[in-house]
Image (tube, rainbow, N blue to C red):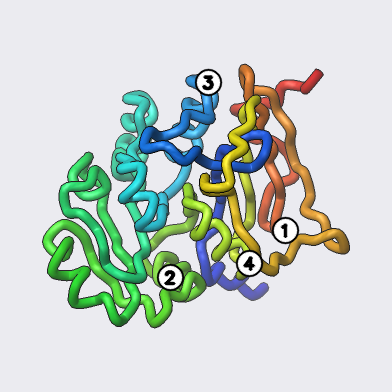
Amino acid sequence: MSRRPEPTRPYVLLSCATSIDGYIDDASEQRLLLSNDEDLDRVDEVRASCDAILVGAGTVRRDDPRLLVRSPNRRAERVAAGRPASPTKVTLTARGDLDPTARFFTAGDAARLVYCATGALEKTQERVGRLATVIDAGEPVDPEWLLTDLAARGVQRLMVEGGGTVHAQFLAAGLADELHLVVAPFFVGDGRAPRFVGEGRFPWHPGRRARLAEARQIGDVVLLRYALSTRCPADPPAADPARPIG
């Protein structure tokens, strides 16, 4: 019996929280809180299950995320299993405009990978080369090549946390296996604010609907889990059962 070939890319899980009208932030300088404590703990659990977490350079600049597993118990479980306490941090940049003092580079001991466009390679190496592994990912950055490179580095499960441009790139290219979309119970109503994704040609449309694998109420927000490929399990994780809505 022949051995099944290894996947050429990691399992890709997209995670996003939006307002009812589809905004991922408002237009103010303060970050808009769309989730709640219970859902943030769920996100932490998902992070702990992954080998790497990816955000775009815009998210690094705007939100200054730490991208670490928050729960001490989950970090300890990862270490006991022979894994780093937190997943590898990954970002991609077209221009190399990254601040070496950002928490992406300074918080925690996780490995850090920066995929940059060829034209920004020298600039990116000068700015953050001493803090992260900088990788030439083509011109423009090719998400499919990036995933192949991550697989070669041992990443089997990748969590993509945004922002909207990065989510759109992975969705339009058909490179996503699963989408966790959390809807907060309010509207933003400001056209200046960023949305989940902008215009684009996506594999899911009125003639090819995405499969809703789970709908779960988490406090005052709702999680919609969409299966975007045959690699996505049909049932909710056994350790985190669905709560019926209604």
Left or right: residue 70 versus residue 245 is left
Task: Name the mark on residue 38.
Answer: 3
User: 4 or 159, which is in the foreground?
Assistant: 159
Q: Which residue is label 2 attached to?
A: 146
Q: On the image, numbered disc 1 is attached to which residue?
A: 230
* Disc 1 to disc 2: CB gap under 8 Å: no
Per the image, label 3 sits on a secondary structure element best described as helix
How far separated are the C-alphas under marks 3 and 1?
Answer: 29 Å
Q: Secondary structure at mark 1?
A: loop
Mark 3 in CB contact with mark 1 (< 8 angstroms): no
Q: Secondary structure at mark 2?
A: helix
Q: Residues within 10 Å of mark 4 (few under 14, many from 20)?
A: some
Which numbered disc, 3 or 4, marks the residue that appears first in the sequence?
3
Looking at the rendered structure, which numbered label has been put on residue 172? Answer: 4
Task: Give the residue type at disc 4.
Answer: Ala
Where is residue 136? Give x, y as percent: 31, 77
Q: Upstream in the sequence, badge 3 or badge 2?
A: 3
Crowd around label 1: few <14 · some 14–19 · many ≥20 (10 Å)? few
- Residue 209 placement: quadrant: bottom right
Which is nearer the N-term, disc 3 or disc 1?
3
How far separated are the C-alphas under marks 1 and 2? Answer: 21 Å
Which residue is found at the position 52% from the left and 45% from the top? 193
* Label whose residue precedes the other's in the sequence (1 or 2): 2
Of the residues shown, which amino acid type is indicated by label 3? Glu
